Image (tube, rainbow, N blue to C red):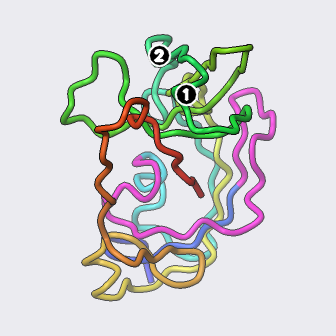
Amino acid sequence: MKIAKNTVVTVNYRLSDAQNNLIEEGTQPMVYLHGGYENTLPKIEEELDGKDVGYSSVIQIEPEDAFGDYDPALIKVEPKDRLPGPIEVGMQFEGMAEGGDPDDEPTIFTVTEIAEDKVVLDGNHPLAGMALRFELSVIDVRAATPEEIAHEHVHGAHGHHHEEHGHQELDDSEPGDHFRSHPLQ
């Protein structure tokens, strides 16, 4: 079966920077619903479209086609007492970027530094500003189920399934509540 819209693609991958320094060796294959559902980077979909099991490739994706350029405006320094404790470097919170439109999606901020009473939060993706090199090897292609197509993501092994297919609304009425712990996979 060829990779096309509404197929579930299983790919072994290795992710490096443009200088070939290893970022991530995929211990589990990447499994995604192909066809513009934003389950993987568009350039990966473009590369794999129409290919079969056994296809291998190395592609380089520039920042603008990956996780964007690094944006210094996404750095925030907040009083430590505005965040739920205990705080550790690497924790992630959901919040709004400075001057952001209230209708915008919340930004995920990562704690990058903790001083006595201040916390530095970075809303950039950890790979922002980097050209990325993907080594890809297609190991399986199957037709997506009607449920996967309706929910726009893979269910089952290496996919994910939510109790509800929406995001919980946040109550931002309390001071400091514009930051919420946000578990990431």
How packed is label 1: few (under 14 Cα within 10 Å), some, or many (20 or more)? some
Q: Residue furthest right?
A: 21
Q: Earlier in the sequence, mark 2 or mark 1?
A: 2
- Quarter of the view holding residue 16: top right
- C-alpha gap between disc 2 and disc 1: 8 Å
**Residue 1 numbered tag:** none
Tell me: 143 left or right of 9.
Answer: left
Residue 57, x across and y down, in percent: 62, 54
How packed is label 2: few (under 14 Cα within 10 Å), some, or many (20 or more)? few
Q: Which residues are magenta?
A: 14-42
Tell me: 18 left or right of 66.
Answer: right
Residue occupied by mark 1 = 128
Q: Nearer the viewer, residue 127 or 58?
A: 127
Residue 67, x across and y down, in percent: 49, 34
Q: Nearer the viewer, residue 26 or 92?
A: 92
Residue 28, x across and y down, in percent: 71, 68
SS type, badge 1 = loop
Residue occupied by mark 2 = 71
The type of residue carrying mark 1 is: Ala
